[in-house]
Image (spheres, grey):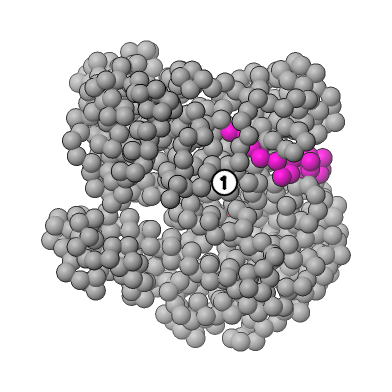
Amino acid sequence: MTSRRDGLSFGGDYNPEQWPNETHVDDVRLMAQVRVNLVTVGVFSWATLEPVPGTFEFDWLEAVLDRVHEGDIAVDLATGTASPPPWMVTLDPLSLPVDREGRRRWVGGRQAYCPSSPTWRLRSQRLAEQMASRFAQHPALALWHVGNEYGCNTPACYCDACGLEFRKWLIRRYGDIGALNEGWGTNFWSQRYSSFDDIHPPRITPDGTIPNPSQELDFRRFFSDHLLSAYVAERDILKRITPDVPVTTNFMAMSRFNRLDYWRWANEVDVVSNDHYPSSRPELADAELALCADVTRGLSRGAPWILMETAPSAVNWRSINRPRPAGQLRRHMVQHLGRGADAIMFFQWRASRAGAEKFHSAMLPHAGTDTRVFREVSELGQLLDDAGEISGSRVVAQAAMIWDWESWWSQEFGFLPTSELSYFRNAMDLHRTFTDQQITLDIIDSGTSFDAYPLVVVPSLCLMDVDVAQRLDAYVRGGGTLVVTYWSGVCDEHDRVWLGGYPGALRDTLGIWVEEFAPLERGQTVALSDGGTASVWSEFLHLRGAESRVEFTGGELDGVAAVARHEHGAGVAWYVATRLDPISLDRHLSDVLTDARLRPLLSCERGLEVTVRRGEHADYALVVNHGDAVREAHFAGFDLVTGRELRTPWSLAGGDVAVVRLEQRVDGREVDGPRQPDS
Ligand code: GAL
């Protein structure tokens, strides 16, 4: 897709400025040896490319590009603007970002810029322009890479210049101050504004109080848009000079970052690329990856995407940094492929000798090539070569799950019934259960039409506007199957409560109403009538049309429904009012699948993760055995990894993977990705 050759792309961040020229020669030789065909160059090179303001030194970079090109390696070329050089602060101290407490964040780390700073805007755009002009014709140039993980280190800036931009954004959103007061509920705590001029970013407030949550929500929206405008400014320069070269910026759709609304960003890139580092909790790592990879494919509207960064082994930013267990790299990378990645890239090619990341793993470790990591990288390069024919194919999904960064944010402003609500965990519980049941979900935004899917899953969509509520209702009436969990449809798009019993936006669709929330103590579990257990959350729920499928037992909630099923029009709406233990969740979601008339696309023993990609000439199954036991699969094909003909049944050893060209097409609908938002 990006290497200008057929097949899958493979490589990583390459930071040659950290090494002498002799090493560069070695780099290209070793890259060729492990089949690297794409490298990202120049992400943090600004200080080397423009050592003093206005003086550009590009010859060294050109020599690097020439060399990798000779090695038949394509380049994802960064504009170099991810982190400004130290001279920027000398030139303009106000170019530094300001935190919530009003402190400037200084140089010495990275990403120390305020996106409102005219100095930073001007200088970064000028560098992008110079880079594009200089390298427009370079034969290695395959892709532009703008910035790096926007918002990662500076998720917000609270300076006066950002305050001014925030006010402009609010004027565009609300038009008049009355509408803002209404949306933010400012009659509370004497917060009513008479003019936009009186509004500031949500800076630190007196002890024991929190800023208005609706203001927090709008500030998050604003800042995501504001950073996006910085990206777009660079992108437009690149498009003017090199209209045919695709442009990306690496997202961070993962559990430990949520500050950008990537639904809005995804519309502005030519190809979606994502960074994903494995979860620190080994028991969650596979499920967390599967969800994040599906989110990335959702952002890409079903098209193949790039895994732009992952770690070949350990990271260095946790308190204890364990290496990847043997074999995990291969399993994880096949999971990414199975969920739509056409490129596997690492941070980084060669382990740094100095600096803050010197103990982060790399494809080429400090100890050199006679290492486990280099061998695993080399085997992976071979696997990607062998599986090259899957590139360009698209994942076949059977159902959809709504994903919403704004609802996730709204859980973070505090002062809720419990601090134990976790948007990501709740979504992952559901996604993981469907993965175990070998059902693949598309991740969609709430503006997408639901009609293409027999089943729509809605975890903790707290913020819900009238339009989404009405479309979900119409979807069920029209024959769809819907599953909604607790903490959905409670507030509107301004974070104001829907009145008349929770969840106000969906009570009629779900055939229930909730009188009072009853969060559980940390670690507390409540028994369920089917022998299962519930944790985190419960509520005093009344049935109004729905039937109870399982009840809480004992205590104040005795007999109250914990899961309800509502036949509504031609469809069915399910409500899950608590965090179910995995076995109960599995059982109830199996019943949901029956309502939706959904079965796995291929017949395989449970315990195998299976996804299907549809190519022009064949369908492919990507199969991962995460466990230790041998598992059976009941379909025929050809394993591109081992070169084995597979006759049904065949078995896959514990920890092993297969990429199977299927003998027959699966009986799944043709998926072109979720439709664009209706509006
Ligand atoms: C990413 C970043 C890389 C590197 C990596 C280390 O957040 O984009 O530059 O710092 O983390 O894990």
Q: Residue at x 70, y 82 (%)?
A: 57
Q: Residues within 10 Å of mark 1 (few under 14, many from 20)?
A: many
Asked if ligand 1 lies within 8 A of label 1, the reply is: no
Which residue has dot 1 on it?
Answer: 301
- Residue 254: give x, y in percent of width and height: 52, 47
303 shown above or below 177: above
Q: Is residue 669 magenta?
A: no
Q: Is residue 640 left or right of residue 395?
A: right
Q: Which residues are magenta?
A: 382-397
Q: Residue at x 33, y 74 (%)?
A: 164
Q: Is residue 624 visible?
A: no
SS of the residue under disc 1? loop
Q: Residue at x 22, y 66 (%)?
A: 177
Residue type (three-letter) at the residue carrying disc 1 = Arg
306 shown above or below 533: below
- Residue 336: give x, y in percent of width and height: 64, 41
Q: Is residue 400 left or right of residue 567?
A: right
